[in-house]
Image (cartoon, grey):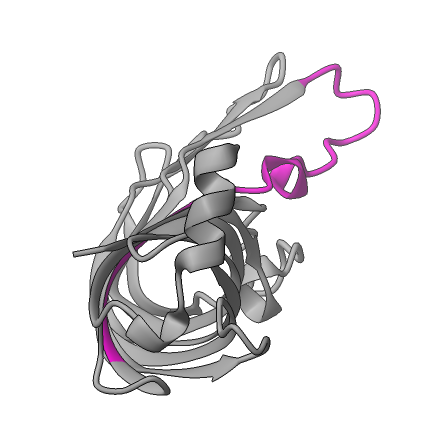
């Protein structure tokens, strides 16, 4: 504690580190069509709250403006309860749903802006805007019916992947512990409009249904992390 106090007393943001790396993690909250739980809406992603991880590098041209490059990964589960359709009354049957998760990974680059909030300039408000390429993998969904005396076929939708344009708009707060280490909290709005070319649905032994599909993957990512001066 004495060493930390000494570093906070002697450090001045006027000698900010131009080059730094950062890492952050926290929850990923689906919004809009991606977070819709309406199983009858073809635009609904049925995504649940998941987990996100940020890794990146930032370079400050000045005290107030910089550039950023980042890797951003997210995992969002599927709200399987929305797929538990009601079976006919008295059928005595059951239905089970197995599903994997939505997975996205993005490479982005953009700009950051810094606004000092204290006289010492140790505490700053940060804005960031970045754009890049996102790779998205949809969940695999397997629906199993068990109805005595019925030939109701099971259905399965394999995972598909696609590449799309993505962008991030972020807001955060950073507190500089010393010349090489800082703490930050942040919130990012992420969005991408993904087009899957060959979404396949297998129903029993019948011919698979194949069609393209679009899915918006909007999320609000909240996180805490560290910045490390290089």
Left or right? Give the position of 135 relative to 32: left
Q: Quadrant of residue 159?
A: top left
Residue closest to the far right: 89
Residue 61 position (above or below residue 36): below
Which sits in the foreground, 75 or 176?
176
Measuring 43% from the left and 36% from the top, which residue is drawn there?
3
Q: Quadrant of residue 220?
A: bottom right
Measuring 31% from the left and 57% from the top, which residue is drawn there?
179
Left or right? Give the position of 77 relative to 86: left
Measuring 27% from the left and 46% from the top, which residue is drawn there?
207
Number of labelled discs? 0
Is 199 in the magenta? no
Residue 204 position (above or below residue 149): below
Residue 2 position (above or below residue 196): above
Q: Which residues are magenta?
A: 67-93
Is residue 212 visible in the rendered image? The answer is yes
Residue 40 percent location from the top left of the image:
63, 59
Left or right? Give the position of 200 relative to 150: left
Residue 190 percent location from the top left of the image:
44, 70
């Amino acid at each position: 504690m004495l060493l930390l106090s000494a570093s906070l007393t002697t450090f001045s943001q006027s000698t900010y580190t131009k080059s730094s790396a950062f890492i952050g993690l926290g929850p990923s909250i689906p919004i809009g069509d991606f977070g819709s739980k309406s199983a009858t809406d073809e635009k609904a992603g049925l995504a649940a709250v998941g987990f996100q991880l940020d890794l990146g590098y930032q370079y400050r041209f000045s005290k107030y403006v910089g550039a950023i490059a980042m890797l951003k990964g997210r995992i969002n589960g599927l709200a399987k309860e929305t797929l538990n359709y009601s079976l006919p009354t008295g059928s005595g049957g059951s239905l089970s749903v197995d599903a994997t998760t939505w997975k996205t990974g993005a490479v982005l680059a953009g700009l950051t802006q810094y606004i000092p909030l204290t006289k010492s300039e140790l505490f700053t408000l940060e804005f960031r805007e970045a754009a890049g390429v996102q790779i998205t993998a949809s969940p695999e969904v397997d629906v199993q019916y068990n109805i005595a005396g019925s030939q109701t076929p099971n259905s399965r939708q394999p995972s598909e992947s696609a590449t799309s344009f993505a962008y991030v708009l972020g807001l955060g707060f950073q507190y500089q512990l010393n010349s090489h280490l800082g703490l930050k909290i942040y919130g990012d709005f992420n969005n991408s409009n993904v087009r899957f070319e060959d979404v396949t649905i297998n129903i029993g032994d019948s011919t698979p249904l194949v069609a393209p599909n679009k899915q918006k993957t909007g999320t609000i990512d909240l996180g805490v992390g560290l910045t490390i001066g290089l």
